């Protein structure tokens, strides 16, 4: 689809971008003397219209209301259904995780666990997964469900369900990427695969899993060849750092080195997510197109994560510096 078709969406988002939670807002929240004062900072952001009659302890209600607004807006202004699917498909797969675990582990009453800001109606997914009743799902998601069900009929450990559905998510997203035909969106997709594979590699190393177990969890199609990760598995950390150095900047390489020394995986995971934000910031210099929508969507997700980190820290009286070590880079 032509970038010019996103002219209206770009104009809408450019008007909203200045109100996204920024570095100044984050610093004010972190430096606030208490939980209630940190909450008040949100009145100066795009969450303000959802804070009426909300008590600080219920701040998550405001975040949920804002996310619903974002969903409705993007569904209305995005001209390409394949691109909308790409943004929200992950939430459908979170629902599929819940539904397949319910099916194979006899869990009842899952309705309240399901997300509703999704591509597919959760009720439709539920009926097809549990009862094979089709209420209007398209062939793409039905094929995924049937393929997954055949696997889970033979093996249904919760972690296997998670890893298999992650693989199928990227596979389906890959099909959407080919239809979207946008270099920037494809670039982000490849970075998400790299991030998933690197974390799978590091977790497998920590758990001392076999190379075959690692191969089962690796996704193909990223910037980093899955075979390259397989090749260095079980070898020195320097071998992994050589691979990362070819695809990532100095900041990520330094954090990987620190991880190898400290074994604090969450710090390195944060550096990978920060790298995604730095990639998305390139959209600020693009006139119009899906790039602007993509960056805004991930910026909003990133803001929610930072708010939750700060508010949880404040609620538990965490030191300011400790909170800061877990915060993501702002857009």
Image (cartoon, helix red, strand yellow):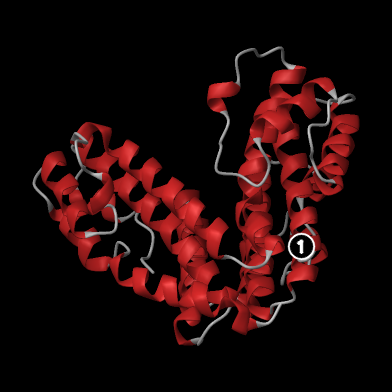
Above or below 250: residue 27 = above
Image quadrant holding the C terminus, namely: bottom left
The reply to whether residue 317 is in sight is: yes
Horizontally, is 251 left or right of 1 in the view? left
- Quarter holding the N terminus? bottom right
**Above or below: residue 238 compared with residue 4:** above
Horizontal arrangement in the rendering, residue 285 relative to residue 192 (left or right): left
Q: Is residue 264 visible?
A: no
In the rendering, at what x and y percent does residue 76 appear? 54, 59
**Residue at which label 1 appears:** 176
What SS does tag 1 mark?
A: helix
Q: Residue at x 40, y 76 (%)?
A: 14
Image location (x, y in percent) of residue 15: 35, 73
Classify 99 as above or below 215.
Answer: above
Q: Position of residue 103 (x, y in %)?
A: 75, 19
Q: Residue at x 68, y 82 (%)?
A: 2
For the view shown, which residue lies furthest in the left direction? 33
Q: Name the residue rendered at 22%, 61% in the picture.
A: 25
Front residue (pair 97, 263): 97
Question: In the picture provided, is 312 more to the left or to the right than 199?
Answer: left
Q: Residue at x 53, y 80 (%)?
A: 7
Q: Looking at the picture, tell me which residue is in the foreground, 170 or 178.
A: 178
Residue 111 occupies quadrant: top right
Neighbourhood count class around disc 1 (C-alpha, 10 Å): few under 14, some 14–19, many 20 upward: some
Nearer-the-camera pick, 227 or 45: 45
Rendering coords of residue 79 (x, y %) = 63, 68
């Amino acid at each position: 689809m032509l970038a010019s078709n996103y002219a209206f969406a770009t104009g809408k988002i450019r008007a909203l971008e200045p109100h996204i939670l920024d570095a100044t807002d984050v610093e004010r929240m972190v430096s606030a003397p208490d939980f209630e004062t940190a909450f008040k900072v949100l009145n100066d952001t795009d969450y303000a219209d959802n804070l009426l009659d909300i008590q600080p302890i219920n701040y998550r209600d405001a975040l949920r209301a804002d996310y619903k607004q974002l969903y409705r807006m993007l569904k209305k202004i995005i001209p390409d259904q394949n691109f909308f699917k790409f943004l929200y498909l992950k939430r459908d797969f979170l629902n599929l995780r819940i539904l397949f675990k319910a099916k194979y582990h006899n869990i009842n009453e899952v309705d309240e666990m399901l997300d509703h800001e999704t591509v597919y109606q959760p009720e439709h997914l539920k009926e097809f997964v549990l009862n094979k009743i089709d209420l209007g799902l398209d062939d793409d998601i039905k094929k995924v469900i049937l393929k997954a069900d055949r696997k889970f009929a033979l093996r249904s450990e919760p972690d296997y369900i998670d890893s298999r559905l992650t693989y199928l998510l990227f596979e389906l997203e890959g099909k959407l990427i080919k239809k979207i035909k946008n270099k920037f969106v494809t670039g982000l997709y490849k970075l998400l695969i790299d991030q998933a594979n690197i974390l799978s590699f590091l977790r497998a190393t920590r758990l001392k899993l076999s190379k075959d177990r690692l191969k089962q969890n690796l996704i193909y199609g990223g910037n980093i060849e899955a075979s390259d990760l397989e090749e260095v598995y079980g070898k020195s950390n320097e071998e992994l750092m050589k691979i990362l150095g070819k695809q990532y900047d100095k900041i990520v390489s330094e954090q990987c080195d620190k991880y190898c020394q400290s074994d604090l995986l969450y710090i390195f995971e944060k550096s990978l997510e920060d790298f995604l934000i730095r990639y998305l910031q390139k959209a600020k210099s693009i006139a119009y197109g899906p790039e602007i929508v993509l960056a805004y969507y991930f910026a909003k997700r990133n803001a929610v994560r930072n708010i939750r980190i700060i508010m949880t820290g404040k609620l538990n009286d965490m030191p300011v510096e400790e909170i800061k070590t877990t915060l993501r880079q702002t857009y």
